[in-house]
Image (tube, grey):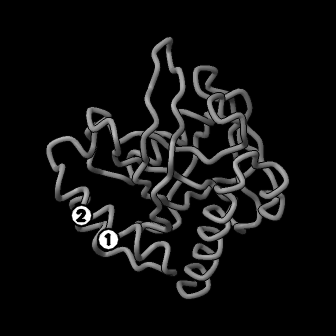
Amino acid sequence: MGYLALLEQFQPCCEQEEGDKRVILDYCRTFPQNILTRENEFAHLTSSGLVLNPSLTRVLMVYHNIYHSWSWTGGHCDGDPDFLAVALREAQEETGLARVQPLAGELMGLDILPVPGHVKRGRYVPAHMHLSAAFVLVAPEGQAVREKPDENSGVRWFDTGELSRICEEPEMVPVYEKIIRRARRWRQQNS
């Protein structure tokens, strides 16, 4: 399935997701030549994975070097239209997880996320927007994890109820909590 079809099939759970879905689809159709790459400097598609344990009660977070906060895993599509493959690859690269899989093949979140201007690898990156497609990924606790020093300085499991305490990006807490609620509903409906 192509990335546009995946975005079109996403079922919003709230007014915010309805609006973000409409804007993201319009932007993708307006800039099909570079929406999957950072060449589109104002906004581009990203894919993230909120890594949860099998009981969906704990979340694996990375301490993001740019945002100075515990954060989910994920990153730029860099031309790859397979959002799920991007989310899985980023989760493994950023945490060292050997075993991680999707809870479902469908998107669990769709958000427009602002990124402040910052320096990365010695180069200034102007403020822009991430058009974020998110999945819930499941990994057993107890696996070895490791940092990815060029991106994060910590990898750690937390109880899902701790997000508002550990996250220094308060605007991200509702995003994470919304995705966790959707994952739990999905699990109830599909078990």
User: Marks 1/2: CA distance?
Assistant: 6 Å
Horizontally, is 5 left or right of 104 in the view? left
Residue 163 horizontal/vertical position (percent): 78, 57
Residue 109, given in percent of the width and then of the height, sits at 49, 66
Rendered image quadrant of residue 149 = top right
List x then y, in percent, for residue 173.
69, 59
Q: Which residue is mark 2?
A: 26
The quadrant of the image that shows the N terminus is bottom left
What residue is pinned by disc 1?
A: 22
| Labelled pair 1, 2 in contact (Cβ < 8 Å) | yes
- The reply, left or right, for residue 31 in relation to residue 97 is left
Q: Residues within 10 Å of mark 2 (few under 14, many from 20)?
A: few
- Pick the residue in front: 81 or 138: 81
Disc 1 residue type? Arg
Q: What residue lies at 54% left-to-right and 26% top-to-bottom?
A: 118
In the image, residue 69 sits, relative to residue 121, either above or below, namely below
The one of 98 and 85 positioned closer to us in this rendering: 85
Which numbered circle lies on residue 165?
Answer: none
Q: Name the kind of residue labelled 2 in the image.
A: Asp
Q: Of helix, strand and loop, which one carries label 2?
A: helix
Give whichever of 175, 72 is nearer the camera. Answer: 175
